[in-house]
Image (cartoon, coloured by chain):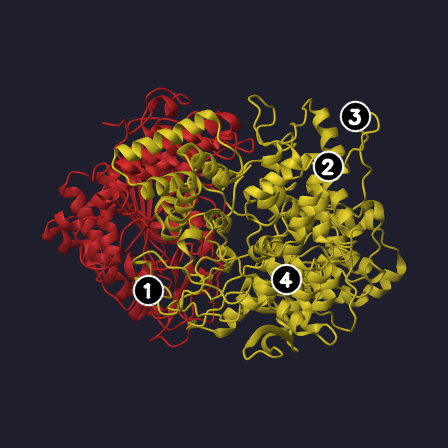
Chain colours: A red, B yellow
Amino acid sequence: MHAPFDRRTLLGRTAGGMGIAALASLLAQDTAHAADTDPPKPHFKASATSGIFVFLVGGTSQVDMFDPKPELAKLHGKPIPESFRAGVRLGQTNYTAPVMQSPFKFKRYGKCGTEFSELLPEIGSCADDIALVRSMHHEAFDHAPGELMLCTGKDQPGRPTVGSWLTYGLGSASKNLPGYVVLLNGRSPKARSYVWGNGFLPATHQGVLFRGGGSPILDLTTPKDITPEVHRAQLDAIRELNALRRDETNDPKFDAQIAAYELAYRMQSAAPELADLSKEPKVILDSYGDGGFARSLLLARRLVERGVRFVTVTHHEWDHHDGIKDGVPKACREVDKPIAALIKDLKHRGLLGSTLVACVSEFGRTAITQGKDMATAGRDHHPHAFSVFLAGGGVKGGQVYGATDELGWKVAEDGVHMNDFHATLLHLFGFDHKKLTFRHQGLDMRLTDVAGKVVAKIAG
Amino acid sequence: MAYRVRFLATTLTLLLPLYAGAADVDYARDVRPIIQKHCVRCHGEKKQEGGLRLDVRRRALAGGDSGPAVVAGKGGELLKRVEARDEKKVMPPAGQLADAEIATLRAWVEQGAKWPDELAGKEPSEEHWAFKPIKRPEVPKVSREPKAIVHPIDAFILAKLSDNKLSPAPAADKRTLIRRLHLDLIGLPPTPAEVDAFLKDNTPTAYEKVVDKLLASPHFGERWGRHWLDLARFAESDGYENDNLRPNAWRFRDWVVSAINDDMPFDQFTVAQLAGDLLPNATDEQKTAAGFHRNTLWNSAASGDKEEFRTYAIKDRTDTTGLVWMGLTVGCAQCHSHKYDPVSHREYYQLYAFFNRSENAEVKLAGAKEFIPTLKDVARETRIHTRGNFLAPGAVVKPGTPGFLPPLKARGDTADRLDLAKWLVDPAHPLTVRVAVNNVWQYLFGYGLVPTPENFGLNGTRPKHPELLDWLATEYVRLKWSRKALIRTIVMSATYRQSSVRPGNTTDPNNELLARQNRFRVEAEIARDLSLATSGLLVSKLGGPSIVPPFPDGLLDQKFGAESLKMPAGDRHRRGIYIHVQRTLPHPTLAVFDAADGNVSCPKRDRSITPLQALTLLNDTVFVECARALGEVVRKTGVTDEARLRGAFELCVSRPPSERELAVLTKLVQRQRELGAKDEAVWFGIARTLLNLEEFTTRE
């Protein structure tokens, strides 16, 4: 057998016989900083080792989905009282717009009795595993800044995303797949690749974009007249020639390049098996249901099973500036069943304890309308108070954390700023958010910027 | 009680002229203490609520979001607010000032608001390097061999290297140099014959001749035009959900390429794109150039207020103009005054007003059937969007430029885009020319002298070589804004010609002081062009409608623009610049290499390294076609395996292989044969290997 891998050439420049994933985490890129920083280790033992970020892009309406507000009915069609307005900035709508009650009913679910909208019965059926946070808030108003806030902890481009921080902190447990995978459904988030970017962390911590439909990765197949052995021989030659040129130029980027080719090779064999759903039982396929988003969540489970550290799955139907009445039920129908199926599937496989599922959005929506006609009215962006939920990964289920005022307008108790949310998330993975840092332009940067406190009740 | 106080205040106000006549108010003695005591906590150095700063004269006079704070002899927002009766409007919010204080402020304003220079106050921005006027710096004297003429660029670089106890790298070898020049100037590799000719030319002007030949090449415009298209957020579809095609957008691309090939001076180039339609007797070309601002996104699916998306487009034009010509993030001021840079909310809408007067128009070109997108001016009033909200119109503003920059000279009563364009390219403008030379530098060194081309403001990175940047800026003006002459000046320097080999130990690992050249991956389009050119498949036809190369299987099945992209493939082996740019579906072979996506202006591309790039170069249709074609060329030309290998290697990277490299390739030939590969497959395999080398897609 021809050696698939010339260890001496590749590893001569790196520390010992570590796997490709560990190698990748050591890679320097275009800057010299990376080499100066030792990869961190978790600061304490924790239950979460992988995460799935279910990102409902556009801004989910908390009062229609997660946070029942019967008081809205009393004010329906009337202006929002003066007392609510102080300090609450509006975007496109304004205070001439009336309050709109939710067209949907809420129900209690599970033993815990957490209330969810009637539009989310399947998610409701997982209530006892879910920690629903009703007091999220931050300051970023528009989509791109909101997405950046959610994914990087800061509303401006240039920082690493949650998945990048986690692969930086934990490395990848998969030798054959990237540590951080992104599956988009529908249009990309507004901030595009910033949503899965590595910021100032080495490029190997960038989320790798898999396609939601068709083959998950483009150009995965070697031209058919090249046998696997010939393909491997060519890759060996590429690697050896690159290593020789590295010695001539002293360019540290070669290490990333070499690792990228090796990972590409491993992905070629791992990805078709990953994407092959034919061996999934029919009952599982049925439980997730049809459509690209459902398939992405199933793929996310398969990725996590195969050691991928972090998967972001997006669903892009939530920016309801109009049509709350029809738009929210339609979008809920697309996500309710697959998300519940994911949680149950992970639980059934014994993976829920180590897999954090976070169902998030960049902000919520206003209790007042956008648009005059109630039948078609929408709601505007509202970062002042909104809901997200967590399941698995050591999260204490069956609880509601935090509360908003009687109109779902402002946080009333136990506010969770996005920086707090991230601090809690890192805590679940065993990191002290103040210590998971990376030196950049003279500063020790972190996911939680300069704030953040762990919400102990969520972390269980 | 409150009633009585108000009554008193009113009475006093009526009596004020008397008081004012009675005593002169002194700013330092009477006014400043009031401001310091009651106002600066919210309108001072740390905070500028409502965009207002009252402790700095320029800012106080300019005012904040509500309008000028102090209008000498007349009034202004300051008086209005301290005298306001409405609880929501009165300042300070904690409660009305004492009557005597109000009277003092009023008297001061009415007496002319005299504010002595020594107390005018300064903002950090007044000290900011990029906002200061450009002066031609003296070229440092550096001691080198007697009589040697030191290129001014090198003098600046050497002086700082020596300050930091660093030495410049030796010159790169001739093979590296000719490949570097070809990649930087035209984005295509030199042919082996061109390399040979350069190696054999031992005259002192050998290098210069190559430079001049490349500057005169029509491919120069393709290469540097693509850089400009990044800034112009050029695309051939609307973006958003419908993402409708813009079938004639390529006319703008061709205008850019030919303007750059003709070396149109950068000032004219600017004026044509910002205001070509407003020039007297505007030509078809000038109207096409004005399509620069037709590259904005357009949401034809907008279900809400159409006005909203019109304002988005105007904001994009405002922000892009600020970014491309001034390196400013003016867009930050659309909701509130800029946090870092001295652009107030009001000033933002004054800039916005230039574009708010413009409407989309179409012009029929002479001899052509189709209509070309351009702009035309109409009368439209601009109001400030309170907190950036177009539904909350504030005060009316007229077109104008930020107060911290040189004054605008308008031709008529109301300034228009032509005045704005001329203001930008006035050599006295501290930003335009600095930003322009920094851009050129970036494309020749991989990084700008200002490494944040997107931000020359207070939050940008200070250049390590501000003097060199200013020297280049004055030189650009002296060279009458000739892009080619500027590039020629830079590439003739020894600094440009240095080797890019990284020293084992250096105190400057990021090479900020330029003790060597940089080694960096070529852009997405060039990765494609290199493969096509090396394999002989390249169709080097210039200009015309774009091409749509095959998309990988399945991609078009997704909903994005699938229908709209079913058009004839055309000449599929043309250069990357001619690939159709669909905003929601960028061609994957380009996107994977960080191509600009045309949604927003892109002053600096990423250079990521990912496994998906490897898969693209190894397996994507066009790259496999190139490998097959190159394999055939190699198979048919050489006499022995060794000759073929040497020839193929040199064809790919413009240098012969080392013995060790040759051994690796020889081993690969043998191994493939052992595995049963036929001759054709063996050379296809060698070609595939070579086209995947890091060095192949790297500019060294």
Q: Secondary structure at mark 1?
A: loop
Chain ID of residue with mark 2: B
Q: Residues within 10 Å of mark 4 (few under 14, many from 20)?
A: many
Name the spot of residue B162 as percent of width and height, x first.
Answer: 72, 25
- Please name which of the two marks, 4 or 1, marks the residue nearer to the observer: 4
Circle 4 residue: B258
Circle 2 residue: B203
**Which quadrant of the view contains residue A337?**
bottom left
Task: Give the amino acid at mark 2.
Answer: Thr
Is A371 situated left or right of B318 in this image? left
The numbered mark, 2 or 3, whose residue comes first in the sequence reads 3
Task: Give the amino acid at mark 4.
Answer: Ser
Task: Give the amino acid at mark 1.
Answer: Lys
Circle 1 residue: B559
**Which quadrant of the view contains residue A357?**
top left
Q: Secondary structure at mark 4?
A: helix
Tally of marks: 4
Q: Secondary structure at mark 3?
A: loop
Task: Give the quadrant of the C terminus of chain A.
Answer: top left
Q: Is residue A445 above or below residue B383?
A: above
Name the spot of residue B556 as percent of width and height, x first.
Answer: 33, 62
Discs 4 and 3 carry the same chain letter: yes
The numbered mark, 1 or 3, whose residue comes first in the sequence reads 3
Checking the image for residue B144, the label placed there is 3
The numbered mark, 2 or 1, whose residue comes first in the sequence reads 2
How far apart marks 4 and 3 lie (CA) works out to: 42 Å
Between B49 and A425, which is closer to the camera in this rendering? A425
